[in-house]
Structures are given as structure tokens and as C-alpha cells.
Image (cartoon, helix red, strand yellow):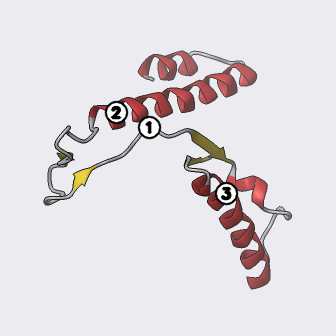
Amino acid sequence: MQQLKATVAALNSIPRIHYLKEQVGSRLDEAMDLIASAQKPEPGGAGVPMPGAGSQPIASAVKAVAVIHASECSLKTYLENESDIEAYLAKLRDKLSAPIREGKKVRIQ
């Protein structure tokens, strides 16, 4: 990811920068999956404790990632009143809940 950051710093092409931004997101997902797989529970079922987490083990499986673009949940450019906020939050909640119900994890952009 650091290599991509250095590459983006030297670029002038907006489409290329956008493409590399997407690549960083994919690499982040891969890195998080590697971390999760390294923290799989032990065969005895005890799990791997996290520092500062008390006695709670980590028991997470590698899940598919759904990318949610929060800006796509708004029908308006500006939210002007409470009902606009409630409509936006309801739509965002629905978009976030669907992949979670499917067993995926969500990354918000």
C-alpha cells in the first residue's frame, strides 16, 4: 500500500489516481483477511486472545467484502431537514444490513 501511495503522489492523471485508489481498497481487504486468518481459533477452541481484550478470544472467519458508497444513499445533494436525514439513514441502513445478513463484511466509502 505504501508503494501505491508513493505512485499516486507522482501522478497527474485523475483516472489513474482513481484506479489506484480502488487498488488500495482491494489490498486493504486482502491485508485484513490475512490478519483474520492468522488469528483463527486454536484447535482446542480457545482462540487467540488480543492484548487488552481480557479473556475474549477472536473467532473470525474470512468473509467476502461488500463496498458501500454512502453518497449513493442520498436522493438529494443537500439534506435540509430532519425528514431528509431520516430518509437518508433508512436507505443507508438498508444498504448496510443486506450484505451483513448475507454473511459479508462491509467497507464504507
Quarter of the image for residue 17 reads top right
| Residue beneath disc 1 | 62
Is residue 55 toward the left or the right of residue 33 in the image? Answer: left
| Residue beneath disc 2 | 37
Q: Residue at x 60, y 57 (%)?
A: 101
| Residue beneath disc 3 | 98
Q: x, y percentage for residue 74? A: 79, 62
Residues tagged 2 and 3 counted as in contact (Cβ below 8 A): no
In the picture as drawn, the residue positioned furthest to the right comes out as 75
Q: What residue type is labelled 1?
A: Val
- Indicate which disc, 2 or 3, sits on the residue closer to the N terminus: 2
- Most foreground residue, 82 or 31: 31
In the picture as drawn, the residue positioned furthest to the front comes out as 44
Is residue 16 toward the left or the right of residue 31 in the image? Answer: right
Q: x, y percentage for residue 11? A: 63, 16
Q: x, y percentage for residue 60? A: 36, 46
Q: Which residue is drawn at 75% across and 23% down?
A: 15
Callout count: 3
Residues tagged 2 and 1 counted as in contact (Cβ below 8 A): yes
Q: Which residue is drawn at 85% across and 64% down?
A: 76
**Is the residue 8 above or below the residue 64 in the image?**
above
Quadrant location, the N terminus: top left
Give the Cα separation between the discs numbered 3 and 1: 18 Å
Q: Which amino acid does label 3 sit on?
A: Ala
**Is the residue 70 above or below the residue 13 in the image?**
below
Label 2 crowd (10 A; few <14 / some 14-19 / many >=20)? some
Q: What element carries label 3?
A: helix
Label 1 crowd (10 A; few <14 / some 14-19 / many >=20)? some
